[in-house]
Image: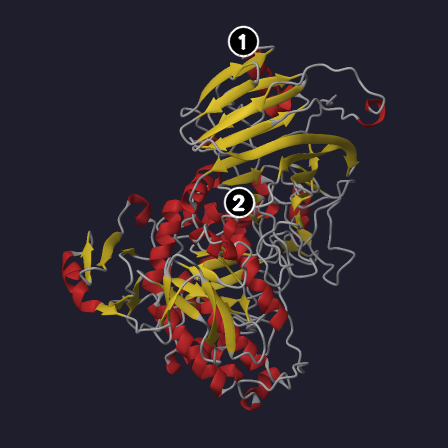
Amino acid sequence: MSRMRLRPVPPDSDGASEATPFVRRRGAVVHASRIAWFGLLLSCATAVAAAAATPMTTLDRQGAWVSVEAYGPNVVHITMAADKAEVLKPAGYGIITAHADNSAFHQTHDASGDTFASPALTLHVNAPPPPHVPGITDRYFAPDLPPVRLQVKNASGETIVDMTGWNMSPHEVNGEATYQVGATFAAPGDEHYYGMGQNQGSLGPLDLRGRVIDCKQWYDAPAGETVCVPFMVSSKGYGIIWDNPSDTHFVAGINGRTRFESKVGERVSFFVIVGNTPETIYSAYARVTGKTPIPPKAAFGLIQSKARYDSQAEVLRVARTYREKRYPLDVMVIDWFYWTHMGQLDINPAEFPDPDGMNRQLHAMGMRSIISVWPRFERAGRYFKELDAKGYFLKDRNGKTVDGLPFRTDRAGALIDSTNPAARTWYWDHVRDNILSHGFDYPWLDETEPDLVPDGFFFSIGSGDRYHNVYPLLHVEGVAKGMRAWKPDKRVLILARAAYLGSQRTGALFWSSDIDPSWEALQRQIPTGLNMTASGIAYWGNDIGGWQWLPQTTSATKAPLLDPSDARDTVGQNNDYPELLTRWFEYGTFLPTLRLHGMRKHTEIWAFGHQAEAIMASYDKLRYRLIPYIYSQAKNTYDTGAPFMRPLWMDFPNDPNVADLGTQYMFGPAFLVAPVTTQGQTEKDVYLPAGSDWYNFWTNEKLAGGRWVKVAAPIDQIPVFVRAGAIVPLGSDIQSTASKQAIAEIRVYPGRDGDFALYNDDGTSYDYEAGKGTTTRLHWNNASGVLSATGGDPAFDRKVAGLARVMGKPGK
């Protein structure tokens, strides 16, 4: 029997409306105003302004309570608990409860149970099983919870979700009596699983089936930081949002079962999204957790960073060198320790004597700036005592501020408690006034996991174990909302190292944390990024070249493909590192964001030898020519929620060969990208999915799909193929996105009819939210060989035929 506890619950900050639920008990429907009143009393008791949940129905299954609500026609939210009050509470952090919408559903009841149907799906909650005489083993092994089973069918009537059981196992966590909660689902043998955030354990396989994912924010994960975004997408045409922010295990298709199990909770809460296309699933995910905004156009150019630029003079020298060499660049980044003390929230005048003037010079060069801001405060800083007195830090069980961690070398600093709204406001106000007001365009919010692991400690909302995964959402969203209020006509851009449900709505660019500068780390990035974007986080990248300190020797046994002799100042005797960085930069050219970074003496394009410089410079220019194509994908992501760097299964669901393929991917609708991740490799086996012909991007050779091909991959070529029927607009050469970019040519890859929505706007404001951008709809008629344009600027539409360049030559 569940025990009543007064504990914090997520504030319904997204403005869910209050409605009176109905209760079905023993087959009769009764008005439940008393239950709504009970929920109101509970909210008052916890001193949190939470609106009542809005279920279509709350069912009693012999003492197991099941609440059902919808978020549009293809989303159902199911909550189960032994305590009725728990199922009446709103959904948790990251969920926009104001978007609950039951209007598409109708409910029926018969002897088999309760059915909730819309044009998109049918949910059936089984009737309770008939009473039975307990057997001899029931005394020892029978579950305490009454059984609950439910199924979800798609619009075609196929059962795609079959929940076979649930559990609430009492235990104590961090001094709190609570439960381990979970749900189990049938796992057909041909089902594949994707998403669940950032997990760097794979060297190539993409499918999570057969794996156990520890879904938690974990900086120290052995293969690289894990990030918990508990959204799983299945090959069967559905996704599950697991609504629990504690440490969660996802067991994918082992012994015929798939299971979610969370460390702390008093209920089981999850959403089922049904859709037969990625766009259908991700648009519903956006409805539940928030839309992905279009970043400022500068986010798609080259971002130059280093750990660290130690002076204003060095920052400006690097920026000027880019302009002198005519290498495009949009953003310069100032990383850590520009401050006098951690948490001082100041800029050291000895190293950066005139940050306002520095930023004016960067802006004059058509560049923007990003500056790193940490959530930690050391005792010697000017704000520690104030924040400690206000109770704005993470606390131990005795109410004392936690200062550093005992198991790492970085042992100094208290964590600002961004679960506390007052602390979030304080933090934003001081970041704005002390740092950003000096002309910096965007913040980099580092250590957002948080790096100070909260387990065993306490946030203002409850234990760090209960709310282990929510910090990156609340911390980043607090700054994002502050930025938009401060400069409402300037798009928010934030670099952020971790994420949770809903983090995509903050305007953040995410990256894979402090990875090694190694071939192995590069290899892990491809499947890692594809499952992260499958989790609804479209803007993901990595530190090009790896972040950790660069070893000055190498264990490579093959001769390097690039001469390292004129890069000794940076690489020492690490002879293959210029090759590694070049391969990584080639891959980065086809990522949502391209950012050079790392703990190296130098990180700039020209610091790794003339051979490497020439290749990376050519890819830098290619990236800028691709910006009209990439920016158009950003608009599509805003409209649909679907990522544009995506695994092949999204575009080729009927090709079984791509279900577990995590070494190559689609970059928008046109490009198939297969990065080289092995030292000394000059050719690569690439799979061309069935259902299309393909063109080699470099040679224009046309090849049939549905097969593996061996592709030449000299050091200056990453294997890239273009889908037949693709339309690829290319822009003119520019030095940054601050310059107006004309369309220089429009490449057409014939073989079938094709369409492309070419989008543009001012690149900086939120006018696009009001529909003020321009969309030119390009259409290729394969039979007539004509490219046409409609809907855009009439003068441009008339030029389109002259800009068209039909690609291709006969192949095999």
- 794 above or below 470? below
Q: Give coordinates of residue 286: x percent, y percent.
A: 45, 42
- 313 above or below 440? below
Q: Residue furthest bottom?
A: 565
- 481 above or below 130? below
**Which residue is denoted by mark 2 in the rendering?**
233
- 771 above or below 53? below
Question: Which SS class for mark 1?
Answer: strand
Nearer to me, 35 or 692: 692
Q: Amino acid at mark 1?
A: Val
Between disc 2 and disc 1, the foreground one is 2
Nearer to me, 762 or 383: 762
For residue 358, side relative to residue 632 (left or right): right
State the image quarter where residue 590 is shown: bottom left
Q: Residues within 10 Å of mark 1 (few under 14, many from 20)?
A: few
**Which residue is denoted by mark 1 in the rendering?**
30
Which comes sooner in the sequence, label 2 or label 1?
1
Q: Give coordinates of residue 14: x percent, y percent.
A: 48, 34
For residue 2, side relative to residue 756 (left or right): right
Q: Amino acid at mark 2?
A: Val
